[in-house]
Image (spheres, grey):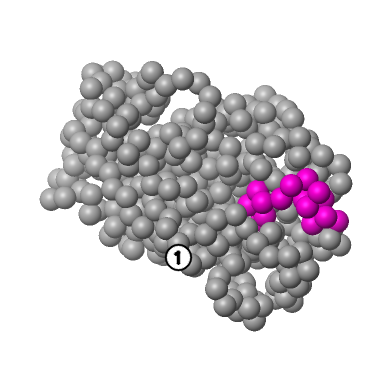
Amino acid sequence: MRIVDVRERTVSIASPIANAYIDFSKMTCSIVAIVTDVVRGGKPVIGYGFNSNGRYGQGALMRDRFLPRLAEADPAGLIDEANDNLDPFAIWSTLMRNEKPGGHGERSVAVGTIDMAVWDAVAKIAGVPLWRLLADRYRGGKADERVWVYAAGGYYYPGKDDRQLKAEMLGYRERGYKVVKMKIGGAPLDVDLRRIESVLEVVGSGDNLAVDANGRFDLDTAIRYAEALRPYSLFWYEEAGDPLDFALQGELGRHYDLPMATGENLFSHQDARNLLRYGGMDRDRDWLQFDCALSYGLVEYLRTLDVMAELGWSSRRVVPHGGHQMSLNIAAGLHLGGNESYPDVFRPFGGFADTIVVEDSYVGLPDIPGIGFEAKSELYALLKTLAGD
């Protein structure tokens, strides 16, 4: 058993949408295929992966550093003998060989993309869905049959008015989502409040609406928004300030006693630990959004969940960023609190299997080996272009 080839390509997910910090007019994404010599159904097992939106494709890092290390490794050292499978932990250690600690930036995205493809291959070799494999290995065989999801959108868009924003959110509600999320911070406060109130006309009450500032605010602005948002009793107020400014997050918590969310731009278990130690987050009220595809993959994500447990946090307080099938599998298999969903943006990567419908804000998962990309036709059509013949 061995990895015989790893293929990667950068693809465009460009669109004219914007949040408070960046626009997506030149956004890219890496896709990866790990080809093995294991045969199932007469074909070699291939694991697929990609990185979440908001971080650019990482092909150069993969080609220059990480994939050569994998190619040079002794194949026997990458095998999990006990499970007769590839060993994601040994592969991860090989990728990270000779990397200094700290500096959890773009390399975490490159490794996370490769790691996703590894786990897809591992579950396919085992002949089970990834969520089932994770539940069996780490949660005593108990998986969540359904996962709570919310619809993320509400981006700034050239010419988009309140009427169009309301129509977008109504579309999510009609497709089965109860909670929706919109962007703030890309317009003056009074304009954002008007936008919020227009969405509330559709979703009914604040507990059905989350808002996301994408790290745009300094402390004074974050507090001004907090004071203005409080009367709405929103589902959460997300990433008000820079994701590494734990002092800002902690001080904001002294001014805003309703749910907050952050963590999608923290890419290691060390950064997660610092957030929980120094960011003033409330384990009974607030939400964490760590995204495995951006943070060195599932191998590192398991360490992050261990850190949370050590500090008294339940895994149910995690609702990962990214809106993709990898996080959905992790949510079901490792008992997270839910998952983000992108029904209308970042196609074909956002959203779930074609046959899975949202019912009262919950989704199921396909019962096929791996992460389930093959059940999402538009995405699989792109991924399998890496498979060649």
- Residue for point 32% across, 50% down: 10
Quadrant location of residue 290?
Answer: top right
- Residue for point 35% across, 35% down: 61
Type of amino acid under label 1: Ser
16 above or below 309? below
Side (left or right) of 105 relative to 244: left
- Image position, residue 174 (x, y; %): 59, 75
* Residue 126 shows in the view: no
* Residue 238 shows in the view: yes
Side (left or right) of 374 relative to 278: left
The residue wearing badge 1 is: 15
Range drawn in magenta = 212-227
Quadrant location of residue 115?
Answer: top left
Residue that extends furthest to the bottom in the rendered view of this protein: 163
Side (left or right) of 335 relative to 222: left
- Image position, residue 333 (x, y; %): 51, 41
**Residue 371 vs residue 166, the one in the foreground:** 166
108 above or below 149? above
- Image position, residue 140 (x, y; %): 53, 32
- Whether the magenta-drawn stretch holds residue 219 is answered as yes
- Whether the magenta-drawn stretch holds residue 248 is answered as no
Residue that extends furthest to the left in the rendered view of this protein: 389
- Image position, residue 309 (x, y; %): 66, 28
- Residue for point 24% across, 42% down: 7
